[in-house]
Image (spheres, grey):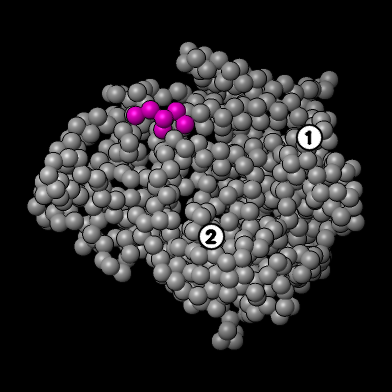
Amino acid sequence: MSPNTEQNTAGRSGAALPSVRPEVVAEVVAALSPRLQKRLDGAAAKITGRPVSREGDDWQIDVDEDVRLVLHAPGGVIRTAADVRCGCLLAPACLHRAAAVTAAPLADPAAEELETPGADASGADASEVDAAGAQTPEAAGTPAGLPDAAEPLAADRPAGEPGSAPLTPAESAAAERLHASAAAALAAGVSGAGGVLQAELLRAAHQARLSGLHRPAAAAVAVATRLRAARTGEPDHRLADLTAALRDLLDLATALGAPAADALDPATLAGLRGTARQAYQEAGGLRLYGLFAEPVLTATHAGVLSWAVDASGRLSTVAEITPHADAASAAPQALAAGGRAVRLGDTMISHREFTRAGLSVQGATRSASGRLGAGAKVRAVRAAGAAWTAEPLARLWAEPLDAQIARALAWAALPYDSRPAGGDLLFLDVTLAGIAAHGDTAAPQLLARCEGLTVALRPAHDHPGLAHRANLALLAGRPGLRLRVIGRLERAARPELRLLAVGPAAPEPPSGGDEAQRGDEARSGDVTLALAADRAGRVNLGLERLQRADLPAGSGPDDGPAAVPASLPELLLDLPGPSGTGSAAVEAPVHLLTRRVEQAVTGGRRALGAAASGAVQDSAAVDGRHLRAAGLATAALLLDGLRESATDQGRDVFGRIVGDDHRAYTAAWLAASCYGEELATALCAAAWSSPDGR
């Protein structure tokens, strides 16, 4: 083995394998015979346990003594079916190739778009390069298609505004195929959605992309990715994420397949179609002020995302994201990316430095979502930054709390490529209130007070390799500490915030009396962070660690009692108990509906249908009665409809279930899922609108 060769073992699905483009999976699996397709899931499980060696851009898997698989993956991504080579006699229509691409992680199109490339030899203009330098399809070429790639492309759409023309026959057919594939995945559930069904979903996604339905195609790839994570027990799998991905895909496919789709206004239809890549507009000269940075971890990529504010107060982002080899190297790679240079012009300022400094940019380009372009015409030089308490950053905290909540909730309902940068971020001044139970869970959480509300502060990311959890643990021991924070809204029935960055609180204005007395009061009540000068009044909680020296005197475990505001004991007594008792209102039992929706995703149609046990059917009926008792009659009606549609399947004369297209069941599930989402959003808005639910 040469010195440049690495060898390891794929201990889990795709741990040591390169990522693969979705259309490659669809093409390779489609080449299998029906007999081999039945054996695909078992073969993929065996592949993950075989030794893998890498030499350059080639990954080699020894299937047995006589058969070797070679995966050619420049940049860590398998881009064509020809890049998967097998030495067995059945190749290329062999089970080994299909098992390898089924076990490999799917390439994330969004992350690939952010990935930092090498030297751009094509001389592409700034308008042809995205935020991290990835070329547009026109400049970089189009990947090889599937056997059915000869179908009409998006370019065959009638002339007019992009995305605004009526649906073409190819688009309607693609939407119908997406709906059928997603309905089959929903009916099968996680346990039944194996490699063949996933490949059909990816094939439908490829057809949708070719016809110009980019947003539904991306949604289908997201569903397939999360199905794989669920089936292989990936640590980042969350059932709520898979449910949301299925809901988004079915919602899009249903809207595009409806008879009235052609009557939609051009803007709505364009939003349903989406775009292949975000367009960048000339922004001219920009004076940027660094705000904060956060680590980014996906199944295949890791890096850092830095946030900045221009003179007008608009937020922008710049990223440094690259593929990672496996989950063990992802967190260190994300932390290391914080020390790499921001790729704007010739500046050599790192992402960590940028959060405390500024840039003066000429020839800037920016997408509608705030992503900054890094084209050849962009020039940037380092400039002074601004404190969080100074303009233009201070205006972010000046926005009223109710307006911030409304903005964040509305942002989540927008199409992904139309969401403005930072729309889901909250900028708050809080006072830590210690550790206590919050809402209907007995688990202790770090709580804070903000404008009469009790807010649970949670880590932005649970990965133990990042600094989030350690920083919150340090803050938890300092009740009474006043902070200025940046966080991401967590939609819940109680106020919750995922912390991203913290800084010292803004000085409180004096309340009255002579000047000397007011100064003494301000100093005695100013219990906040005491950061070193080089931290410039902020800490990026995912990339940097707070130290005990950053906390005011009396905050360490071996120090004397800390100076706690006199009002704090009253705040702690007023916190809600583990059952939601005390001053907090009783929470609506939305979970009774959402858990059945998620149960259908996990177990498929059988989990709620006639094949379900009597205990499951009885408990579902009890859930309906509880929902009605709580005043949620619509939720109870939707739950009953979901159960009935799951059971209502045709049978032949011998009593065997006759296969159907699952349309009625899918419609009932989608209605219940969407209603649960809207209800959860309304409850979240209500929780933030009244102090402690009163």
| Residue 229 point in image, percent of width and height | 58, 50
| Residue 25 point in image, percent of width and height | 74, 58
Residue drawn at x 38%, y 22% is: 586
Q: Earlier in the sequence, mark 1 or mark 2?
A: 1
Q: Is residue 595 left or right of residue 167?
A: left
Taking depth in this image into account, of 395 and 60 the one nearest to the observer is 395
Name the kind of residue labelled 1 in the image.
Leu
Which residue ends up furthest to the front in the rendered image? Answer: 514
Residue under label 2, please give it: 317
Q: Quadrant of residue 538?
A: bottom left
Work out whether 455 lies above or below 525: above
Q: Is residue 222 left or right of residue 390?
A: right
Taking depth in this image into account, of 309 and 135 the one nearest to the observer is 309
Look at the numbered disc 1 and give the secondary structure of its residue: loop
Q: Check if residue 59 falls in the magenta segment.
A: no
Residue 264: mark in rendering: 1
Residue drawn at x 81%, y 39% is: 176
Q: What residue range appears in magenta? A: 685-691
Name the kind of residue labelled 2 in the image.
Thr
Q: Principal SS element in the magenta part?
A: helix
Q: Which part of the image, by quadrant, shows the C terminus?
A: top left
